[in-house]
Amino acid sequence: MHVSQLCQRDLQLLTTNAVVLEADSLGPKVLRLENGQFLKFFRRKRWLSSALLRPYSRRFAENAERLRALGIATLRVHTLYELPDTSLSAVLYAPLPGTSLTQLAVRPEFSWEQILPKLILFVRGLHERGVYFRSLHLGNIVLTPENALGLIDIADMRFLGKPLPNYMVKRNLAHFSRYLKREKMQNEFPFSQFYKALTGSESPSDSSKSA
């Protein structure tokens, strides 16, 4: 994993004609460069933080390596950058080719019935391999040109080395459910079927309806 210093002048050269894909009040978060690679910035939110010893950019890169070692499709990191602003770090990577499930869902010909079995197998595989991806949702799951599913935006992740216990599976699916509600997709996505296939029980919302 190559680590490099990136001065302000070199940063400006690297990002010439880049397209901002994500930003917040502090500035750009993800840029698409002219060569098609992505540059993602990570900001340390607190001065005293574990990110001092293990920056988010390094976690991002290490997670990509571990996912690929498990046979899970994901992006490929090229370089970690240290920046003049020590609260910032960055990572240069090649994106995972494909289309996110959120993007697929808006296509007129799309049906969840087509992809739900594949999605259930994919998420079950993550859980069985001990991957706890806190940001598991349709926007971070990509259907690749090879018709496989993979993951993006992978900074917030744990590897347990053994299958997730059922309570962690349910907690993971609760995050998934919150994303559906936030994106107003809860009426389109068959979450009850998805939840039952992965946990063997009804989702909490179904249980409350039948009570």
Image: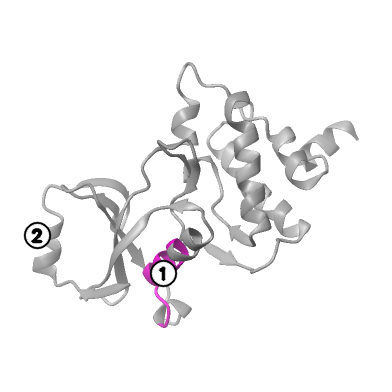
With respect to residue 88, does 25 lie above or below?
above
127 sits left or right of 150 in the view: right
Q: Would you say residue 135 sits in the magenta stretch?
A: no
Q: Would you say residue 57 sits in the magenta stretch?
A: yes
Q: Looking at the image, can residue 44 be seen?
A: no
Count numbered badges in the picture. Answer: 2
Q: Quadrant of residue 79?
A: bottom left
- Residue 100 position, x and y percent, is 45, 38
Q: Residues within 10 Å of mark 1 (few under 14, many from 20)?
A: many
Residue found 30% across the figure and 57% down from its top: 93
Which one is nearer the viewer's eye here, 100 or 162? 162
Which one is nearer the viewer's eye here, 203 or 72? 72
Q: What type is the residue that disc 2 sits on?
A: Leu
Say the numbered circle drawn on residue 73.
none
Q: What coloring was used for the rendering?
A: one colour
Say the numbered circle drawn on residue 13.
2
Q: What type is the residue that disc 1 sits on?
A: Tyr
Quarter of the image with the N terminus is: bottom left
- Spatial distance from mark 2 to mark 1, Cα to Cα? 24 Å
Q: Which residues are magenta?
A: 53-64
- Residue 199 position, x and y percent, is 77, 47
